[in-house]
Image (cartoon, rainbow, N blue to C red):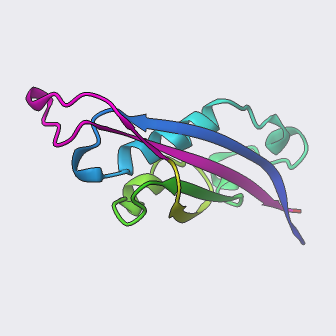
Amino acid sequence: MTIKRFIVQVGSGTDQHGHENDCTNAAIKAIKNAISDNCLTGLIEICDLRTPKQLLQMKVHVKIGAPFPDKLDKKKVLKAIPFGEKSLEVVKGGLLAQCVQIEELGDTSNQMIICNAAVTVSVDL
């Protein structure tokens, strides 16, 4: 058997209330954006992965570009991936943009944090 890439999908996520430069929420939104924009029918129709237990066989690698890569809760981010053997790579990237600071919402800065995700699904054929 050989592991082959099935799809690479990209997404972007924004946290308009980037508390303490924590990139976790923006990274989770980026993953959800990437995986919500596709329907992997080929996993069933071509690879014959039909049950949630079988879907655990697929490999899901996520690469996140984040302005503050060290300020990201990797365990929380990995939970955004519903199935498969999960792996995560975080690199310096993304974007910061000036937004507004609303103290009543607990904002600690006026920075908007934007993260990018590349989600790669591979299968063992």
**Picture coordinates of residue 16, whole percent (x, y):** 33, 32
Which residue occupies 71% across, 43% down?
9
- Quadrant location of the C terminus? bottom right
Depicted 57 relative to depicted 18: above or below: below
- Find the magenta span and give its range: 95-124
**Picture coordinates of residue 50, whole percent (x, y):** 75, 43
Depicted 83 relative to depicted 97: above or below: below
* Residue nearest the observer in this picture, 102 or 33: 102
Q: How many marks?
A: 0
Which residue occupies 85% across, 40% down?
42
Depicted 82 relative to depicted 107: above or below: below
**Picture coordinates of residue 101, whole percent (x, y):** 19, 31
Which residue occupies 80% across, 44% down?
43
Q: Is residue 10 left or right of residue 106?
A: right
- Quadrant location of the N terminus? bottom right
Looking at this view, name the residue that lies furthest to the left.
104
Depicted 16 relative to depicted 116: above or below: above
Looking at this view, name the residue that lies furthest to the front.
98
Is 117 covered by the magenta stretch? yes
Q: Is residue 16 left or right of residue 102?
A: right
* Residue nearest the observer in this picture, 114 or 25: 114
**Picture coordinates of residue 82, whole percent (x, y):** 54, 46
Which secondary structure type mostly characterizes the magenta part of the structure?
Answer: strand
Q: Is residue 19 left or right of residue 41?
A: left
